[in-house]
Amino acid sequence: ASGADVVFNTIVPPGLTPFLEELHKAGFGKRGGRIVCTYFDENFFNLVPSEQIEGLYSCLDYYQELDEPFGRALLRRYSERFPGGATLTAGSGCTGHYRAIKMWEAAVKEAGSVERDTVIRALDHVR
């Protein structure tokens, strides 16, 4: 044992599932260890037992489970566009990329230009 308190995971699937299993078997969580996985979303819950990810930290900007304005609007638009279709599985940062593109679009419109420095100034306050 290394004595590490935190594991900042950068392993991509399919390697993540066996890694979490071995980390759990080694007693990392029972010793108070914490796992950080920046891309861990609700889609991964079906891949690993909950006890292997208890206390895991992630930092995505969208979780379907959370009831907040952006999520409600996203689900409504998706359901209108794809009625009766597959369930929305937004994850792994795709909503953050969407927001970033829309934020850049708003900054370009406000700046009236795609010139880098002008857009950067608009990004400082645009919504």
Image (spheres, rainbow, N blue to C red):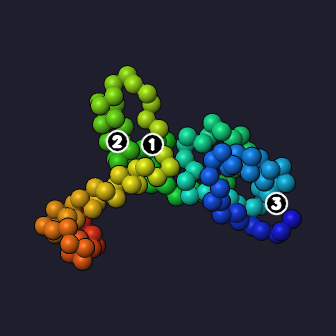
Residue 125 visible to the viewer? no
User: What residue is disc 1 on?
Assistant: 90
Residue 21 visible to the viewer? yes
Mark 1 and mark 2: span between their CA atoms?
Answer: 10 Å
Marks 3 and 1 in Cβ contact (< 8 Å):
no
Q: Quadrant of the N terminus?
A: bottom right
Classify residue 104 by image quadrant. bottom left
Residue 9 locus on image (x, y percent): 65, 59
Q: What type is the residue that disc 3 sits on? A: Arg
Reply above or below: 9 against 88.
below
At label 3, counting other C-alpha atoms closer than 10 Å, the crowd grade (few under 14, some 14-19, many 20 or more) is few
At label 2, counting other C-alpha atoms closer than 10 Å, the crowd grade (few under 14, some 14-19, many 20 or more) is some
Horizontal side, residue 87 vs residue 106: left or right: right
Q: How many numbered circles are shown?
A: 3
Residue 119 locus on image (x, y percent): 23, 71
Q: State which mark lies toward you, 3 or 1.
A: 1
Q: What type is the residue that disc 1 sits on? A: Ala
Q: Quadrant of the C terminus?
A: bottom left
Q: Identify the element where label 3 is drawn.
A: loop
Marks 1 and 2 in Cβ contact (< 8 Å):
yes
Q: Which mark is residue 31?
A: 3
Residue drawn at (22%, 60%), measured in percent from left and top?
Answer: 106
Classify residue 78 by image quadrant. top left
Residue drawn at (63%, 47%), measured in percent from left and top?
Answer: 13
Residue drawn at (24%, 77%), measured in percent from left and top?
Answer: 117
- Which sits earlier in the primary sequence, circle 3 or circle 1? 3
User: Is 51 in front, or is 46?
Assistant: 46
- Which sits earlier in the primary sequence, circle 1 or circle 2? 2
Reply above or below: 90 against 10.
above
User: What residue is disc 2 on?
Assistant: 74
- Which sits earlier in the primary sequence, circle 2 or circle 3? 3
